[in-house]
Image: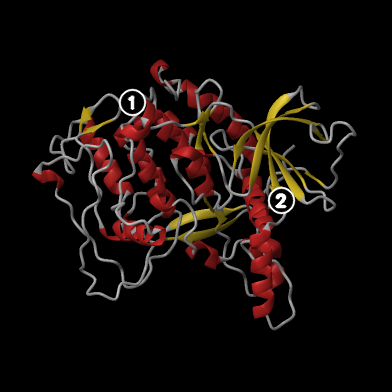
Amino acid sequence: MMRKRSASTATYLGRTLEYDPNPYDIPVTCYLERPSGQRKKKLNQYLREERVGKGRHGEVYLSHDTLHEHRAVAIKVVKRSNPKDKIKLLRRNYQQTDGSTKQALNSTENSVRREVAVMKQCRHPNLAQLFEVIDDPREDKIYIIMEYIPGGPVEWTHGEDHLPLLTLAQTRRIMRDVIVGLEYMHAKGIVHRDIKPSNLVYTANRSCVKLIDFGISHIMLPPAPKKEKDDPVDPELRALFPVTDLTRRIGTPSFLAPEVVWFHDDSDNTSTVSPCDSPPGGSRSASSANVSTTFPIPKVRPPITPAIDVWSLGVTFFCLLFGHTPFNPSSDNDNVHHNEFMLYHLICTQDWLPDDYMGADRLWTGGRHPQDQSSEAYAVLHLLDEMLQKAPKDRIPLSQVKRNPFILQDVLDPKEWLRYTTPLAASPENLSGFIKSAARKFVNVLSPKTKGSGS
């Protein structure tokens, strides 16, 4: 029987986010057994096999759980620290005057603990699931046992040609899966912060896409009460997710929102920048409807909210449609820092421009602002426009993205699908039942043509 879960809420830009102080019961094992002769092969009940991935802080191995019918799992192996952590700690200790030797907040071990804390809050059919954490203090590594998702990341472009690989129907199905998973995270008060195609992974039969990699995700905790004893949030969790962490430029540069890459502009704030380079293999429209516009940089940084994920999802949507990112600074300069700054300048000030055609099915776009409101291109580009608004307050929320005609196309019963994919439709006490029923309903309310995300 599931225990009652009391939640706290916080409001950001008029949107209510829910923080649940009682995460799902994920076992944390404090011992590690490696039988002699199998030290590299067996970790407790898990048989480790080949490496299937490498992340920011560790390697991921395919393994099998001998206590659960040899089900396939993914084990992420992370070292507690690396040489950079030691430098950061020495610098911090030198700067401290109170004698404290606490680890720097961006140390490898704390990054792992943040990822685990986020995954403990999440249980959804479109999010990678956490099963167990092996954290033996005698070991120099932490082992995170997660759901194994064998279909591989979403492939979206033809290599050097930079042409779209996916049809519009495939893109629509992928977007639907990501939207409902991300909307669930936002309802729980969690910002993913690294939405991009490589973090979208197919299940075995490509019937579903799941969102992975919560390494830089952030739990937006409710404000601390005046009395510490009245705080429903664990003090260690507050230390892991300080509000100031949101202003850091972490993530994948091309997918960062304008408010994340914001910088103070000392000019008259009306400066212009050359349009983005034409993408390799891409075809920018030469029509007058595709004239680029520029935007001023705000004098004050806009607030960092879950809207940063909507921007990143919009960039991802653009990639799936056109086979390249929307902002591409000139590559003439070999200075990495200069190119990154130019990219940030484009993100903050430059409008995006579509190609002449979108999708592998080569649908004519009709320019930046297509005139035919009944066309599919109009619905797609209008949605992109709403997702890629420079000001976060003007950006469309996910609850409205999922109601866009393009997203709902091919859904047999849109009202039923919207009801069963809305995270707040079920009370926290019934969340487990909601997840099971939703997993079935996701398929049942789609027409037969849309039951596969990959083909």
Q: Secondary structure at mark 1?
A: loop
Label 2 sits on what residue type? Lys
Snapshot quadrant of residue 321: top left
Image position of 414 (left or right of 30): left
Picture layout, residue 79 above or below residue 34? below
Label 1 sits on what residue type? Thr
User: Relative to the observer, which residue lies in front, 276 or 236?
Assistant: 276
Question: Would residue 233 be seen by someone viewing this image from the given angle?
Answer: no
Q: Earlier in the sequence, mark 1 or mark 2?
A: 2
Image position of 172 (left or right of 190): left
Q: Residue furthest right?
A: 36
Question: Which residue is at a point 64% across and 36% down the rendered structure image?
Answer: 432
| Residue identified by numbered label 1 | 167
Image position of 33 (left or right of 357): right
Snapshot quadrant of residue 143: top right
**Is disc 1 in contact with disc 2, using a CB cutoff of under 8 Å?**
no
Location of the C terminus by quadrant is top left
Q: In this figure, what is the number of numbered marks?
A: 2
| Residue identified by numbered label 2 | 79
Picture layout, residue 140 above or below residue 172? below
Residue 308 percent coordinates (x, y): 42, 54
Q: Secondary structure at mark 2?
A: strand
User: Relative to the observer, which residue lies in front, 317 or 395?
Assistant: 317
Question: Which residue is at a point 31% across and 51% down the rendered structure image?
Answer: 331
Q: Please name the colour scheme applied to the rendered image.
A: secondary structure
Q: Residues within 10 Å of mark 1 (few under 14, many from 20)?
A: some
Residue 262 percent coordinates (x, y): 37, 65
Picture layout, residue 291 above or below residue 227? above
User: Relative to the observer, which residue lies in front, 39 or 310?
Assistant: 39
In the drawing, what numbered circle is on residue 21?
none
